[in-house]
Amino acid sequence: MDTNKSAPYTGLTPDCVLDALDSIGLRGDGRLLGLNSYENRVYQIWLEEGQGLNLGPSPAVVVAKFYRPGRWSDAQIAEEHAFVRELAERELPVVAPLAQNGLTLHQFGGYRFAVYPKRGGRAPELENRETLEWMGRFIGRIHAVGALEPFRARPALDRESFGTEPRDYLLEHGFIPADLSAAWTSVAAQALEGVSRCYARAGAVQSLRLHGDCHGGNVLWTDSAEARGPHFVDFDDARMGPAVQDLWMLLSGERAAMVRQLADLLAGYEDFHEFDARELYLIEALRTLRLIHYSAWIARRWDDPAFPAAFPWFNTQRYWQDRILELREQIALMDEPPLWPA
């Protein structure tokens, strides 16, 4: 198995995937389907009958996630699994890893993997006010649990890890075109200064265990009478941070629309967890950090053949010109009043 940086999944063949499941007592019937994932490799796998799993109607189907080598430590993955299983035990609608032989994290052929029950659903209708309030209630419940104790192995979302360090990586590894380097360096520095001002306005806000990447693509909405509503999936980016991180990515459109959306989310959220309004100063700061971090995330994976194929527009002249304009817009937005809900 080859887990080098440029081809970390070379050895992850269909036979390897099926053998990995077989090693923990789950026998696939030969059918598997690759699902959309760039950071990890995720497969939907059909199992032979008689597996002894309560996964719904036959044939049983599971989802296996093979973690990118070197990204998380075993302890960090274990914290993610423990958090999601804690949420599931409290009857929150999350998709938690299955325990086989008492373990949720397994190893085979040099790869680490986890197995999940397959859950169907559609994207939530975020333009619907009832949907937003419903989502807010469940995020509030997740945060009420997340605030009970901290992650100890997983990192925090902060200016250094999502801003300064990614900025430095891009510069040190020559991703910024020479003729745009001065402009991008200058605007990135101004953007990070704006982030610092936003954090200063917010003051000492609480940090808690988060989903970390709570956007519409990580929520499955079901309409079944037994489990109607949102189901939160993919806690791979779970970390410590301010509560508003799990709210702002659900906002979109013009300022007036986002104010209304935020009010709907918080109407449900505060039924279960108190929201510190000072965190509203962080929304545009967190958006700015995500933009810088996202560029560096692609850059770090650029030697992985899957990334140039998936992001052909990355690292072009136009790409960095657009990022400069984007950060300039963020600098202005960070100095505007926060999105106070009506």
Image (cartoon, rainbow, N blue to C red):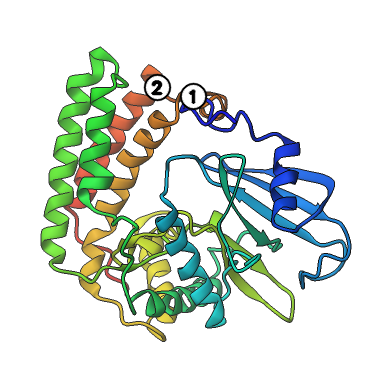
Answer yes or no: is residue 8 visible. Answer: yes
Q: Nearer the viewer, mark 1 or mark 2?
A: 1
Residue at the spot of label 2 = 315
Q: Amino acid at mark 2?
A: Asn
Q: Amino acid at mark 1?
A: Ser
In the picture, the disc for residue 276 is none
Answer yes or no: is residue 122 visible. Answer: no
Q: In the image, what residue occupies the spot 29% across and 53% down?
A: 286
Q: Secondary structure at mark 1?
A: loop
Q: In the image, what residue occupies the spot 31% across and 82% down?
A: 274
In the depicted structure, whether residue 212 falls above or below residue 130: above
- Does residue 209 appear left or right of residue 183 in this picture? right
Residue 68 image offset from top left, x and y in percent = 51, 41
Towards the viewer: 15 or 204:
15
Residue most extreme to the top: 179
Q: In the image, what residue occupies the spot 31% across and 64% down?
A: 152
Residue 38 image offset from top left, x and y in percent = 54, 39
- Does residue 292 appear left or right of residue 213 in this picture? left
Q: Quadrant of residue 254?
A: bottom left
Distance CA(mark 1)–CA(mark 2) = 17 Å
Residue 88 image offset from top left, x and y in percent = 56, 76
- Does residue 185 appear left or right of residue 298 in this picture? left
Classify mark 1: residues with Cα within 10 Å, few (<14), some (14-19) or many (20+).
Answer: some
In the picture, the disc for residue 6 is 1
Give the position of the N terminus as an image quadrant: top right
